[in-house]
Image: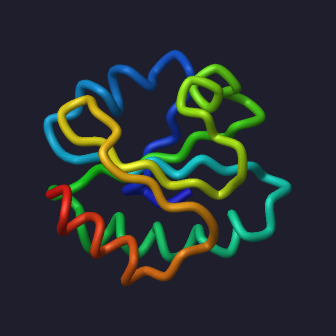
């Protein structure tokens, strides 16, 4: 995992995501998911480029089913965007870096 990406669990989700003072990009993924692995380098690049502006987090849905269920994650990868503790946007699938950047601009 890249140094700028935070691994979030059911237990740490509220503190790491909902109480963040900057917008948060949360990637819901699983180790066995090919598209999730394909998306990882894009998120690592974004985490480095956007460091200080947004927080990039990952939630393994197999290890953390409660938070995945809470937000209705049905397919992965799913990226949720949070601002001020509220979910404000969602992208599903191995989306392009530009699409993620557009949402970051919108919610930032």
Residue 83 percent across, percent down from the top left? 22, 41
- Residue at position x 56%, y 21% from top? 10
Quarter assignment of residue 77? bottom right
The answer to whether 21 is drawn above or below residue 28 in the figure is above
> Residue at the spot x=30%, y=45% of the render?
88
Answer left or right for 12 relative to 17: right
**Could you tell me which quadrant the N terminus lies in?**
bottom right
In the displayed structure, does residue 54 sit left or right of residue 9?
A: left
| Image x and y of residue 106, in percent | 19, 64
Which residue, as the protein is rendered here, is positioned at the far right? 32
Q: Position of residue 22 (x, y in %)?
A: 17, 44
**Quarter that holds the C terminus:** bottom left
Which residue is drawn at the image coordinates 58% and 54% (left, top)?
Answer: 78
Residue 17 vertical placement versus 81 (above, below): above
Taking 1 as reference, is 39 above or below it?
below
Picture quadrant where residue 93 is located: bottom right
Q: Is residue 84 left or right of residue 98?
A: left
Residue pushed farthest top?
Answer: 11
- Which residue is nearer to you in this view: 7 or 66? 66
């Amino acid at each position: 995992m890249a140094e700028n990406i935070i691994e979030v669990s059911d237990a740490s989700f509220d503190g790491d995501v909902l109480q963040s003072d900057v917008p948060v990009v949360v990637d819901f993924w699983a180790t066995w998911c090919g598209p999730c692995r394909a998306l990882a380098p894009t998120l690592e690049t974004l985490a480095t480029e956007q460091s200080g502006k947004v927080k990039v987090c990952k939630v393994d849905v197999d290890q953390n089913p409660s938070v995945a269920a809470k937000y209705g994650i049905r397919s992965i990868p799913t990226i949720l965007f949070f601002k001020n503790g509220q979910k404000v946007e969602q992208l599903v699938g191995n989306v392009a870096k530009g699409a993620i950047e557009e949402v970051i601009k919108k919610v930032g």
